[in-house]
Amino acid sequence: METTVAASDPQFAHIRIVLGIVLGLALTTLLKGLAKFVQHPGRERIYGVHLGWALSMFILLVHFWWWEFGLVRVHPWSFTSYAFLVLYVVVLFLLCTLLFPDDLADYSGWRDYFQSRRSWFFGIMAALYVIDFVDTLIKGKPYYEHFGVEYPIRNALMVVLSLVAMKVRSERFHRAFVIFAIVYELSWIYRLYDYLP
């Protein structure tokens, strides 16, 4: 009954529309970028780490859109909560635009582009996990606590790894980081939202 009341809340409906617009733009940017590899397969050499982060961003966007269902439990809304959510989706959008620039004319390929932009990409990613943490705290202690002790550890680890990735060029590190990020995010989503026996 409480969920029905919250779901019909005009504030919540308005917030969902705003988030949906920005998330839609982020997904469009990501999918259009990935489509270039199919449309022009021989134009630029594919870089596995770059593609891995594109997949990771797709998973984060889908996760965020699913997580939005849980916002019906946030009642009443404050402008601070709303502002942090908007900031969150804007940061997701920025990460997608960093992965797929308008052109690669100034770079020798995807590897050169990604490595030259890695400080921006991972700096913004570190900020994303800090914003996520603050956003969760703003929604109240019960909301924060339902994620358990793993949540702050997860966010802190992703911030630290992102800061390291800003400085390190090692292919082995970047491959390991993107694989870890994808596998861990899928595990986190499954454990949060799917039904376990």
Image (tube, helix red, strand yellow):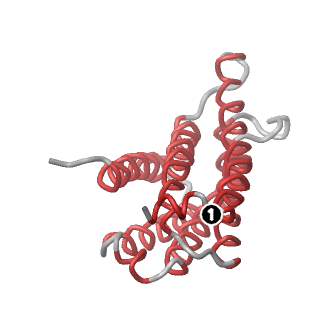
**Residue 179, position in %: x, y?**
41, 45
Q: Going 61% across and 69% down the picture, which residue do you hit? A: 127
Viewer-nearest residue: 136 or 26 = 136
Along the horizontal axis of the image, is 192 left or right of 140?
A: left
- Relative image position of residue 43 (x, y in whole percent): 73, 20
Q: What residue is disc 1 on?
A: 9
Q: Position of residue 2 (x, y in %)?
A: 45, 66
137 and 17: which one is in front?
17
Residue 7 vertical placement versus 81 (above, below): above
Establish if 175 lies above or below 139.
above
Residue type of the residue flagged with mark 1: Asp
Q: Is residue 170 left or right of residue 109?
A: left
Q: Residue at 78% x, 39% y: name it.
A: 107
Which residue is pictured at 65% across the width and 18% down the height?
Answer: 38
Q: What x and y, as percent, mark residue 178?
A: 46, 48
> Which quadrant of the figure has residue 143?
bottom left
Which residue appears farthest toward the left when viewing the image?
A: 197
SS category of the residue bearing label 1: loop
Q: How many marks?
A: 1
In this view of the protein, which residue sits in the foreground, 93 or 40? 93
